[in-house]
Amino acid sequence: MKILCIANEIDPKLYTKEIRLEFKDIQFILSSGNLPIEYLNFISQELKKPLYFVVAKHELHSIEKPNSYLHLLNTPILIQGLWIAGLSGAKKINNTIRQHTPIEQKRKINAIGRHLFFKKMLGTKLDILVSCSKSTEDTAPLTRLIKKYEPRIFIYGQGHSYNEQERVSTIKNTKLINVSGHYILDI
């Protein structure tokens, strides 16, 4: 299964009618934030594929979306056989919406953790966790969640890495992928 993952910046390779041919094998699209809604609309409509997203700190306060969009929140959902959850928002820098204090972010992460605990008890793991940014501190709540529940893949859009070695890293059994620009996830 091929998933088009996008984040952080408009990629000219995707913002063209040729996207239909180049990415015809894509099953669905995951966006980890910081992209204009017009760009998301274009990609989803050209590929005629559903788009699942988290909202970062730069998006509008309200997003009008067609039915083929789904905002990934703190609850894992089943998408084409994969359990996927999202963590929206970013670290508080000023007082705009979708920016959270460390305590608020910890609450959101704990909400996902509660769901993952029950999934683990039932013998199911999270396949993909989507976030706007990667936790860089070893003791941060998001890093602890990844270490404890080991989702198969954690995708985020932070910084601008195009070198495969810089894009992909691991924490325990979880593959962390920076999907800035675009990245094809083949599961």
Image: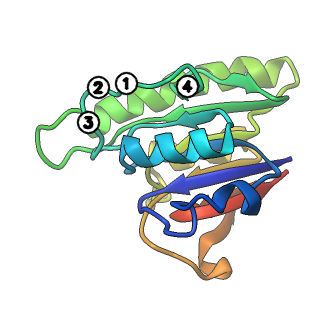
Q: Which residue is mark 1?
A: 64
Please tell me how crowded label 2 is: few (under 14), some (14-19), or many (20+) other residues with Cα within 10 Å.
few
Q: Answer few, some or many: residues within 10 Å of disc 4's Cα (few below 14, many 20 plus, some between 14 and 19).
A: some
Q: Residue at x 11, y 38 (%)?
A: 95
Residue closer to the observer: 87 or 141:
87
Can residue 172 be seen here? The reply is no
Tell me residue 86's x, y (percent): 55, 34
Q: CA distance from mark 4 to mark 3?
A: 16 Å
Q: Secondary structure at mark 1?
A: loop
Kind of residue indicated by mark 4 = Leu
- Name the residue beneath numbered marker 3: 60
Circle 3: is it few (<14), some (14-19), or many (20+) Cα within 10 Å? Answer: some
Lower position in the chain sequence, tag 4 or tag 2: 2
Q: Do the residues under discs 3 and 2 have CB atoms within 8 angstroms?
A: yes
Judging by the rendered image, the residue that carries numbered circle 2 is: 62
Circle 4 residue: 70
Q: Residue 177's quadrant in the figure?
A: bottom right
Residue sitting at x 27%, y 47%: 58
Q: Is residue 167 above or below residue 10?
A: below
Image quarter of residue 112: top right
Q: CA distance from mark 3 to mark 2?
A: 5 Å
